[in-house]
Image (spheres, grey):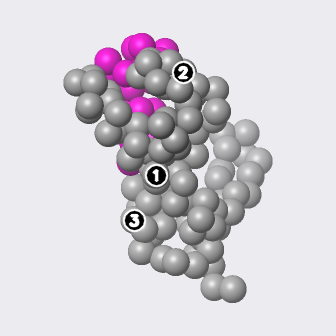
């Protein structure tokens, strides 16, 4: 299996572009501030769901006429996190997805395309 190695220190946008260009497994080494490393592997299927959820959140937010700032306030999450989710730069938690769903006044299943 051919894999690409990326470090978050080079910028998450670069990682997203790399993920978008490859159909192979991409391994990302996350360097935490505690100097310990956490290894995460995202397959193309993993990235596909991260992308679909991000795009769905953006569509729902735009459909309701909300800005990223509005959604962040309603969901009680940082504004930059909304942008990173919508650009599928991060694999966010279920807790955050639940907060976003409530802020958008939809069931959490709607974030996964289940209406």
Q: Earlier in the sequence, mark 1 or mark 3?
A: 3
Residue 78 is covered by the magenta coloring: yes
Using the numbered discs, state the Cα–Cα distance from disc 1 to disc 2 in whole angstroms: 18 Å
Question: First in sequence: mark 1 or mark 2?
Answer: 1
Vertical relation: 60 (above or below) 75: below
Q: Pointer 1: what residue?
A: 52
Asked whether residue 61 appears in the rendered view, the answer is: yes
Res. 71 image quadrant: top left
Q: Is residue 65 magenta?
A: no
Element assignment for label 3: helix
Residue under label 2: 99
Residue most toward the front? 115
Q: Which stretch appears magenta?
A: 69-87
Front-lying residue, 58 or 30: 58
Label 1 or label 3, whichever lies nearer to me, is 1
How far separated are the C-alphas under marks 3 and 2? 27 Å
Q: Which labelled disc corresponds to residue 74? A: none
Query: According to the image, label 3 marks what residue?
Result: 17
Are the residues flagged by discs 3 and 2 in contact, CB closer than 8 Å?
no
Tell me what residue is drawn at x 38 percent, y 47 percent. 55
Residue 31: x %, y % from top left = 65, 51
Secondary structure of the magenta portion, mostly?
helix
Q: Can residue 83 be seen at all in this image of the molecule?
A: no
Identity of the residue drawn at 64% across and 33% down = 94
Q: Secondary structure at mark 2?
A: helix
Mark 2: give few (<14), some (14-19) or many (20+) Cα within 10 Å: some
Q: Residue at x 64, y 53 (%)?
A: 30
């Amino acid at each position: 299996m051919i894999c690409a190695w990326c470090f978050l220190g080079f910028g998450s946008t670069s990682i997203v572009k790399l993920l978008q260009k490859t159909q192979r497994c991409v391994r990302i080494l996350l360097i935490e501030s505690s100097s310990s490393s956490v290894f995460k592997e995202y397959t193309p299927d993993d990235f596909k769901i991260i992308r679909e959820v991000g795009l769905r959140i953006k569509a729902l937010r735009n459909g309701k006429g909300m800005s990223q700032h509005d959604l962040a306030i309603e969901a009680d999450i940082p504004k930059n996190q909304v942008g990173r989710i919508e650009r599928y730069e991060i694999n966010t938690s279920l807790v955050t997805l639940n907060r976003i769903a409530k802020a958008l006044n939809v069931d959490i299943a709607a974030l996964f395309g289940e209406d």
